Amino acid sequence: MGPLRRRGRAARFAVTLGLAAAAHVAIASTLFCWPTSASAADKGSSTEKLIKDGKSKFEDGQYEESIEKLSAAILKQDITKDQKIEALRLLAYNYIVRNQDDSARAAAYQIFALDEDFALSKKESPRFREPFAKYKKLWIDDGKPGQPKPAEKPPAAVWLKHSPATEVPHDSAISIGGSVDDPDKRVAKVSLFYRAGSSGKFTAADVALSGSSLSAKIPSSAVKPPLVEYYLQAFDEGGIPIANRGDADTPLRVAVAGESGSVFGTWWFWTGTTAIIGGAIVGGILLSRHKNPSAPTSTVTITVGQ
């Protein structure tokens, strides 16, 4: 065998190993790890989508799901003033319908702090206009809380600190631990939201707070292969979300091992990996051919496992 042929075989082998390793990391990250940061445009569209979803859920009478979506939108760092007012308005509507007057008032107070001249349309139902008129009067009587005052220090940010597990056994409860960084003592409650798989409703559970430490559990009944999704959310006294770790749109994910062991060793995981790698390579070749029809075609064979 000539030197050129040996070097060619070595190069092909290196490419095979490199692509296989990259695929392992990429697919594992996609399925089971905390989502990567999106571009500013993607974040903006995500916030708008959450608000639209929250509105749709409210109109369908799915109030818990609506609150989940709107809470996630409110905590997005790139949310605009107008988007936040809209999300808070819909959040207040949910609380009014659920007869949670304190939470509805808290949401309305935040709206008035953002826009003192805010008023609902006269076409809006009296069911909402009347409480908002009442809340506006109360907000003024209370000294317009939330409105920035000269030389007033803004409230310190609240952080929920928690590191998710990578993989857990099936049908085994997951202990959630972490801490709350809350310099101004604004947190009144922390909740855990979890679900088996990547679709359907999240179930809410209380989180125990002891000083700055937090703890909770995802019950074994929800820990089913291939994964569990969950997030943590902190609320102030009015029930308005002020911090989160994950959310309904981008939850934390933990892989759940099946009967045969780790999901990373199952046939379906690697079959899917091979298929995705093949699709990516074919797509790249087709794109290259489209840009340069005279470019030579090539074939790359990747074998992962037997």
Image (tube, rainbow, N blue to C red):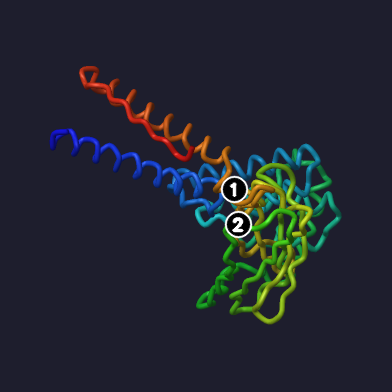
Query: Looking at numbered disc 1 in the image, what kind of residue is underneath it?
Result: Val
> Disc 2 on helix, strand or loop?
strand
Callout 2 touching callout 1 (CB < 8 Å):
yes
The quarter of the displayed image where residue 175 is located:
bottom right
Describe residue 79's horizontal placement relative to residue 257 as left or right.
left
Q: Is residue 196 visible?
A: yes
> Disc 1 on helix, strand or loop?
helix
Identify residue for label 2.
Answer: 167
Q: Residue at x 60, y 53 (%)?
A: 84
Identify residue for label 1.
Answer: 263
The quarter of the displayed image where residue 134 is located:
bottom right
Q: Which mark is residue 178?
A: none
Q: Residue at x 62, y 74 (%)?
A: 179
Query: Looking at numbered disc 2 in the image, what kind of residue is underneath it?
Result: Glu
Describe residue 150's horizontal placement relative to residue 66 as left or right.
left
Which residue appears farthest toward the right when viewing the image?
A: 99
252 vs 156, nearest the viewer: 252
Residue 259 horizontal/vertical position (percent): 69, 48
Q: CA distance from mark 2 to mark 1?
A: 9 Å
Mark 1, Cα crowd under 10 Å, few <14 / some 14-19 / many 20+, is: many
**Who comes first in sequence, dot 2 or dot 1?**
2
Residue 124 horizontal/vertical position (percent): 76, 41
Which residue appears farthest toward the left when viewing the image?
A: 3
Residue 238 horizontal/vertical position (percent): 74, 66
Q: Is residue 87 visible?
A: no
Mark 2, Cα crowd under 10 Å, few <14 / some 14-19 / many 20+, is: some
Q: Considering only vertical position in the picture, is 28 above or below 285?
A: below
Residue 232 horizontal/vertical position (percent): 66, 61
Which residue appears farthest toward the bottom when viewing the image?
A: 211
